[in-house]
Amino acid sequence: MDDESWLMSAYCIMKRFLGIARREYQLLSLGQYSDLLWSTNDVDSIRPSPLRMMKSHPDNFNATVKDCVPGLNALLMYAVMMPQERGNPLAVSLLGVTASLRDLGVDMDPLTNVMATWFSLTPIEPTLDAHGEKKVT
């Protein structure tokens, strides 16, 4: 392997490793972790373990939810902006998660509450699926 191909290979390997390590670092902030698997100097051998572990305590639930709310808000915004047939089912599911968290006593972000209210005021139209049955989108 000449110097140029070695440099390109090393760059690709480090870029892959750093991307996975960055994601693992984000998961650590949520109390999750896994092993990084790296068996050879092949880019495809670098991957996170499929088994995730959780380090937490039931008392940390509200703190974990608080860390996840920005992601929930982003998903709600995407769902609202999607075409209705794709966005409405996603938004309904996310609003179910929001309602369940509220029922568990989690103080939700004001933006989440505003989006949930706005979405609940948006008309949901029934459409027909491939079998001619009505479905809500």
Image: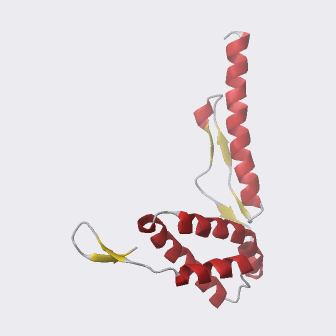
The quarter of the displayed image where residue 52 is located? bottom right
Q: On the picture, is 64 further left or further right than 75?
A: right
State the residue in front, 99 or 57: 99
Q: Is residue 123 above or below residue 71?
A: below
Q: Can you give x and y, in whole percent of width and height, for residue 136 in the image?
A: 37, 77
State the residue in front, 51 or 110: 110
Residue 109 seen in the current view: no
Residue 86 seen in the current view: yes
Q: Is residue 84 above or below residue 105?
A: above
The quarter of the displayed image where residue 4 is located? top right
Q: Residue furthest top?
A: 2
Q: Which quadrant would the C terminus be assigned to in this image?
A: bottom left
State the residue in front, 21 or 131: 131
Total marks in image:
0
Q: Residue furthest left?
A: 131
Q: Name the residue: 73% across, 19% down.
A: 7
Q: Is residue 124 above or below residue 20?
A: below
Q: On the picture, is 26 further left or further right than 72?
A: right
Q: Name the residue: 45% across, 68% down.
A: 84
Q: Name the residue: 67% across, 80% down.
A: 114
Q: Can you give x and y, in whole percent of width and height, for residue 67 in the image?
A: 75, 69
Q: Which quadrant would the N terminus be assigned to in this image?
A: top right
How was this image coloured? secondary structure
Q: Name the residue: 73% across, 46% down.
A: 21
Q: Can you give x and y, in whole percent of width and height, for residue 73 in the image?
A: 66, 70
Q: Can you give x and y, in whole percent of width and height, for residue 69 in the image?
A: 70, 72
